Amino acid sequence: MGTTKKEELVESRLPQIRALMSPCRLCPRNCMTNRHNGETGFCKTSDTIKIASWAHHKGEEPPISGSNGSGTIFASGCTLGCFFCQNFPFSQMGNGKPFTSDELGKIFSKLAAEGVHNLNFVTPTHVIPMLLEAWLSSSETAKLLPIVYNCSGYESKETLDLLEGIVDIYLPDIKYSQNSVANELSKAGDYVEVNRRTLKQMYKQVGQLEINETTGLATRGMIIRHLVLPQNLAGSEASLRWLKSEFGTEIHLSVMSQYFPAYKAHQHTIMNRQITADEYMSVLETIDELGFSNVWAQDPTESGGA
Ligand code: SF4
């Protein structure tokens, strides 16, 4: 099989994407560290990718997981500093094993050969050059799978511009509607404006979620995720109103109830508990009142998901 358009795009843009790492401005933190010389910034990552795990993930939204699972790849490090992160052993503490691009490409190929429906890069922002290098070395089968960019929604405009035509499905969060809360909980005092600009840019690239009618699988588009937090710290209603005003009521939303106090959250007077069924139902009622029509919700009593 010849070179695909996506391969050509990755090959041609990879030098620019790699250049964004030294001095590093891959994400909005703009640490300006020289990662090619082994320096690290906020995400505690040099130009070597460490992988914590990979899986056939069946717990994503149905058009992403399908029957065989989504090929999730979890890298070490993160551009946010959420003190309640359920993935803290690798997002905050650096757990994981270094992989060369060839080694990682073989993992992508293996996942594809085993029948996953997509390659799902989880928290990819700070390691996107290495993920794309690995992707280039993966099998033809792997390269035909949709690329899912599964992120916190805290992205730089420049990096996202370079991913246009490469990423098929964006899976961003809308975490907060107040910067003061974002600063306290995730060390990102500019989260709200950056996140809203990010979501608009992603939507402009890929549009509404497209689902293959035969397979039920997503092929392109965006699903926005929102994790409900105790005592409405996520500012859910304000985010939902903004989403409606910006994208209308047909945007695909995934509203999650699975918060539990991980990492350092037990030290916080509000975040030290799971949400109540009433707190979650109140957000679902707002969604209903606003008229959103494409929503995935969880069991109100569920907690501890991936
Ligand atoms: S990717 Fe890491 S080093 Fe680069 S700007 Fe973001 S947090 Fe800083």
Image (spheres, helix red, strand yellow):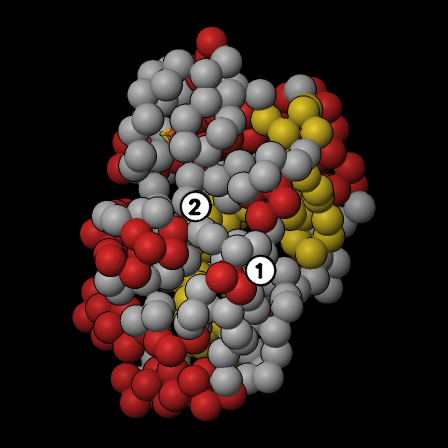
- Residue at left offset 69%, top offset 62%: 58
Q: Front-most of 137 and 187?
A: 187
What percent of the width, then of the height, locates residue 201?
27, 47
Which residue does the numbered mark 1 point to in the structure image?
Answer: 262
Rendered position, 24 above or below 262: above
Q: Residues within 10 Å of mark 1 (few under 14, many from 20)?
A: some
Q: Is residue 71 left or right of residue 121?
A: right
Rendered position, 53 above or below 301: above
- Residue at left offset 73%, top offset 49%: 55
What percent of the width, then of the height, locates residue 204?
28, 50
Q: Secondary structure at mark 1?
A: loop
Marked residue nearer the N-terminal end (1 or 2): 2
Which numbered disc covers residue 297?
Answer: none
Q: Residues within 10 Å of mark 2 (few under 14, many from 20)?
A: many
Name the quadrant containing residue 159. Answer: top left
Whether tag 1 and tag 2 are in contact, CB under 8 A, the answer is no
Which residue does the numbered mark 2 point to in the structure image?
Answer: 81
- Residue at left offset 61%, top offset 73%: 303
The kind of residue tagged 2 is Gly
> Which quarter of the figure is the N terminus placed in?
top right
Please tell me in which quarter of the rendered image ligand 1 is found.
Answer: top left
Q: Secondary structure at mark 2?
A: loop
Q: Front-most of 31 and 1?
A: 31
- Tell me if residue 85 can be seen: yes
Q: CA distance from mark 1 to mark 2?
A: 13 Å
- Tell me if residue 139 can be seen: no
Q: Is mark 2 within 8 Å of ligand 1?
A: no
What percent of the width, then of the height, locates residue 271?
46, 68
- Residue at left offset 71%, top offset 43%: 54
The kind of residue tagged 1 is Ala
